[in-house]
Image: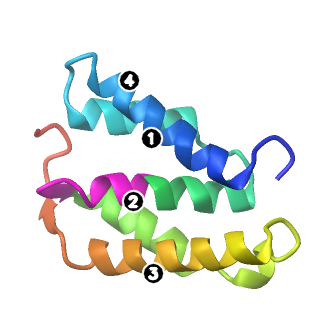
Amino acid sequence: MEDWEYNEIFEAINEDYDDYLKLNRGHEYAIARTVNDYINLGKIEDLIVDTAIGEILLSQNKVFIGYVEGITKRLSMFEDLDAISELTHEELADLINRIEKVLDGLSKVELEYNPYSE
């Protein structure tokens, strides 16, 4: 992870999501803009982004099925060997714990099939 520190990605995503929410254009807009801002940062960075977005989505009553399917697919493919050289032991343990919570939570959320609903 050349350009980012582990916690810095989580903090930046949450701050940007909150900033987009303040524009009063709704949760879906805030999520979409945040996802778009942090797309394709790098293999490990993208796992962290999906985890952070997943954590935000878990706070919603319903979650668009496209987000659930995409994040679940990508996080399910995570192998900690990929991250061992880029994260500290503590960061890796935290990421694994967060990924497990997001995957578990996304498996239980009520799904929204309309991407434009709030």
Image quarter (top left, top right, bottom left or bottom right) of the C terminus: top left
Q: Which mark is residue 14?
A: 1
Q: Earlier in the sequence, mark 3 or mark 1?
A: 1
Q: Earlier in the sequence, mark 3 or mark 4?
A: 4
- Spatial separation of the CA atoms under disc 2 and disc 1: 11 Å
For disc 4, the neighbor class at 10 Å (few under 14, some 14 to 19, many from 20) is: few
Identify the residue at horizontal 68%, vertical 83% (top origin). 79
The amino acid marked with disc number 4 is Asp
Q: Earlier in the sequence, mark 4 or mark 1?
A: 1
Q: Which mark is residue 90?
A: none
- Membership of 60 in magenta stretch: yes
| Residues marked 4 and 1 touching at CB (< 8 Å) | no
Judge by depth and name the residue closer to the eye, 93 or 20: 93
Identify the residue at horizontal 36%, vertical 67% (top origin). 69
Q: Which mark is residue 19?
A: 4
Q: Start and end of the magenta stretch?
A: 53-63
